[in-house]
Amino acid sequence: MSEEADVSQPPRPPESPLAMPHQSLRAAPKTARPRATSKAWRKGFVGAVSVGVTTFAWGEMYLVLNVGGMTALEWVLLCVFCLNLAWIAFAFGSATVGFLVAAWRELRPPKRCEHELTGRTALLFPIYNEDVASVYAGIEAAAKGLRETAPNAFEAFILSDTTDPEVALIEEEAFFRLRERIGEGFCVWYRRRPINTARKSGNVEDFVTRWGGRYDHMIVYDADSHIETETLLELTRRMSASPDTGLIQTIPQLIGGKTLFARTQQFAAALYGPFLGTGVAWWAQDEGNFWGHNAIIRTRAFAEAAGLPTLPGRAPFGGTILSHDFVEAALLRRAGWRVRIASEVGGSFEECPPTIIDLTIRDRRWCQGNLQHAGVLLRAKKLTWTSRLHLMIGVMSYLASPMWLLLILVGMGLSLQGKFLAPDYFGSDRALFPDWPVIDSARALRLFFLTIAILFAPKLYGLLIGLLSKDWRRKVGPIRTVLGVLAETVISALIAPILMAAQTGSVVSILRGKDTGWSPQQRGDEGYRFGDVMRRHAGAMVLGVALMTAALLISPVFAVWLSPAGIGMVLAGPLSWWTGSLGAGQGAKRAGLMLTPTEVALPAPYTDSRAVRSAYEGLTAPSFTEALTDGAWQKRRKALPDPHWPLARGEVHSALATGAAKVLSHASETDLESFLTKAERMALLDSPTELSRARRRVRAARAERTKKPALRIVGAQG
């Protein structure tokens, strides 16, 4: 710990509790506010587009297949095709509206809110075994910007759920350094939970129930979030101006991508994300959604309405709700609060996973959380239909992948049926002319082009927005925008089958009852060894080889039809390794491919955090043995561990109890660190009383050992 660290200032403010009852899904709260009305015609318009396109395509597909009568397999193909197309058609309708609204905003930009800044706002930083330097540098950048523009109106609260003792000790060192560097005008607080109940949602709930009364609003960050100072002020002004609004969600842009995969995701989010989010905001209105971070929340509303229940049964479908954000937004709306998506507010950023593997690891957890929403939909009463639609979109976003694979397999089955099964041309009745098993190929080709047009329309919309936007024209340029769209389209088309295979595997794994667990997210650019990448994608490559081999056996034409999906899976390992490499990403950057305006002119919170990161990278923490035996160090950080252990009466924390017992029985600091498990070391660090008791025990054992040799020598002389 730095000698200059001010240990006299408490690490946490006085508690100001807010009751946060766990809501019943089956009964709406009795104190619900009157709901603000929404324009139903907006939802009806998008729904009509989706239904109209799907109905037309269904009719065309039926006519394609029904030239010679419908077989059972053709009926299956028709149903699966329509389910897939309905999902695409809804996205198309929402994107079309979003494109039109976004294009209008390019001509007439919206005005900033001029309402007076009122109340106190907490910036929440929930972290879990994260890279300390990155997180604390981001907090410092946000704090210094607000300290200069709105002193004492904002405070930062680090909500640590870290379970690694080495990371936890460095977090503590970084906290004291952060306070030294920020100075007056902005308060930073730190709390690390000794018991990680309910993961991230439980982390935020612990904050609300203990300190929520101190703050009017809270802005939730992710560990890699960056939000411009003016955006923070704008969100707070909007919340102050609208007392019946419970949550305002921004649309984060991706930033800092270095690998080719990250740059591809970053480009797509920058060009397509704003108008896609604008479309959702247009039809959702006051019944928007929450994506877990980069949003401002009215603390009292959240406490009253958004306490999450525990789902009945065991994980993966029961237990803690993993994708808590969607459900929290639905509960806020059920209680009458407005939930808005501020698509016109920029300056909100987050970093993206550097590789396909890192994305699929995170995606596995999201998949389980979104599939849990099916249970929420079945149990929940009084949710608005728009909130239900948000939850259904979350479920469908992961079921779409196995449905896409099912469509491929059924199409393959039909082709096999036509090639290898002998048809009965004349049936059971005598007939002069045979009944040929054919399809309407001309109509099928038109339907194919219609599907492609709907699927790729958002790419065209994004290109038009890029050519229309002054920001894109000035910083990127029309030619590089066009080339970027082409490069992103090709790379995304190659990656899509890999993600389809991964998501399908996740869905199957969850349906088999496997829980995802809770592991920290990889946020660096270290990459993976080629052999590890190949092993990770072995299943997708085997599936791709099997599909392409079967397609070639059926016919070369069918193999060509399948090749867009098959090639991506066959080359999953090499593609994943290539797109996850820094060399390929930096090569694309040097070539000017997939540049974004924010990459050309990096936003201040990101550059500021990178500029101060070195102040935290050199921090070192004592080893556990040093922490155990250094009384002065223990005294200096005595107030830092959270004394709140949410244990029932008579309940014992097993890791703390066994750790203390091991110290009592072993009491040798030389190998005690390896003798204790990570959970036991963490529990002892979280309990200053037990840590001090362990230090006294170790010192006593050391003194006892130093006495014994002297006694043996005296005895020999006597």
Image (tube, rainbow, N blue to C red):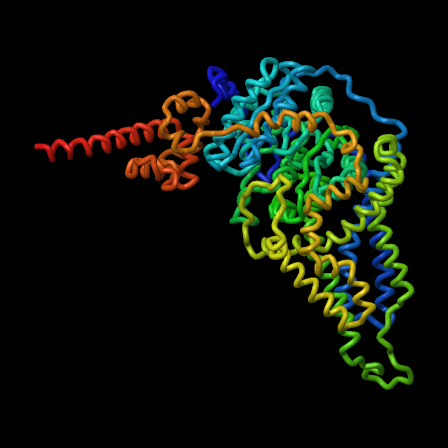
Pick out the residue farthest to the left. 718
Q: Quadrant of residue 500?
A: bottom right
Q: Nearer the viewer, residue 182 or 20?
A: 182
Q: Nearer the viewer, residue 138 or 126?
A: 138
Residue 645 drawn above or below residue 152: below
Residue at left offset 83%, top offset 25%: 110
Pick out the residue farthest to the front. 717
Residue 367 appears in the rendering: no
Residue 466 drawn above or below residue 6: below
Q: Is residue 637 left or right of residue 154?
A: left
Residue 537 appears in the rendering: yes
Q: Residue 665's x, y, as percent?
A: 28, 38
Residue at left offset 56%, top offset 22%: 178
Please count the marks in the image: 0
Residue 183 drawn above or below residue 136: above
Q: Residue 324's x, y, as percent?
A: 61, 39
Q: Is residue 22 left or right of residue 525?
A: left
Residue at left offset 73%, top offset 15%: 116
Q: Quadrant of residue 248?
A: top right
Q: Residue 547's x, y, as percent?
A: 71, 65
Quadrant the C terminus occupies = top left
Q: Residue 261's x, y, as percent?
A: 71, 45
